[in-house]
Amino acid sequence: MKSEPQNYSIDNLYEDHTQPWDGVRNYQARNFMRDKMQIGDLAFFYHSNTKIPAIVGISKVISEPYPDFTQFDAHSKYFDPKSTKDAPRWMLIDVEFVEKFKRPVTLNELRSNVFLAGMQILQKGNRLSITPVSHEHWEIIMQLASK
């Protein structure tokens, strides 16, 4: 799960303890979150659109998906006039802080590791804010983070 640190960072999640993961406005990312993520699942927290993009920590899913309240707020940048409370388009989940890495795992590190070549986030043109991570890739990234 990626976020721009100037908007919401791992440190913000640490301070808040829990947070609704709102503002997802890509159908494929929404579907990953809505259909694949379950309570108790762990997720990497990735800082994007920053000088050194990197995985900086871990969060945990702590709720079932439910309608993203920002889609109904006309003053929100995530407002969707075509979405209704009876038929919401956008969902969110609540996440909880688990861990901030002592050492971020940079995008360049991820790209240079041949064992991570199949990760969706590393595929050319990928712009999704939420992507699945295989168990094998998770273990490799955890090893990198602990160096």
Image: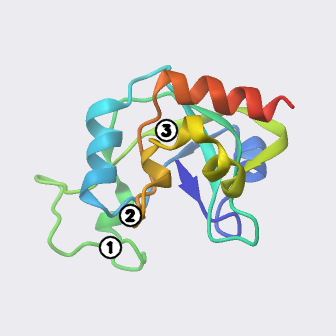
Element at label 2: helix
Q: How would you rate the neighbour count of disc 2 (Cα within 10 Å): few for under 14, some for 14-19, many for 20 or more?
A: some
Mark 3: which amino acid? Asp
The dot on residue 37 is: none
| Amino acid at pointer 2 | Thr
Q: CA distance from mark 1 to mark 3?
A: 19 Å
What residue sits right under mark 2 in the picture? Answer: 70
Q: Position of residue 74 (x, y in %)?
A: 33, 78
Q: Residue at x 78, y 34 (%)?
A: 145
Identify which residue is drawn at 32% across, 73% down.
79
Closest to the observer, 43 or 133: 133
Outermost residue to the left: 86
* Residue 2, position as x, y percentages in the image: 55, 54
Mark 2–mark 1 CB contact (< 8 Å)? yes
For badge 1, the amino acid type reads Phe
- Which residue occupies the foreground of this view, 49 or 84? 49
Return the residue at label 3: 94
Q: In the picture, residue 71 is in which quadrant?
A: bottom left
Quarter the C terminus occupies:
top right
On the rendered structure, is 23 left or right of 13? left
**Contact, mark 1 vs mark 3 (Cβ under 8 Å):** no
Tell which residue pokes out farthest to the front in this image.
Answer: 114
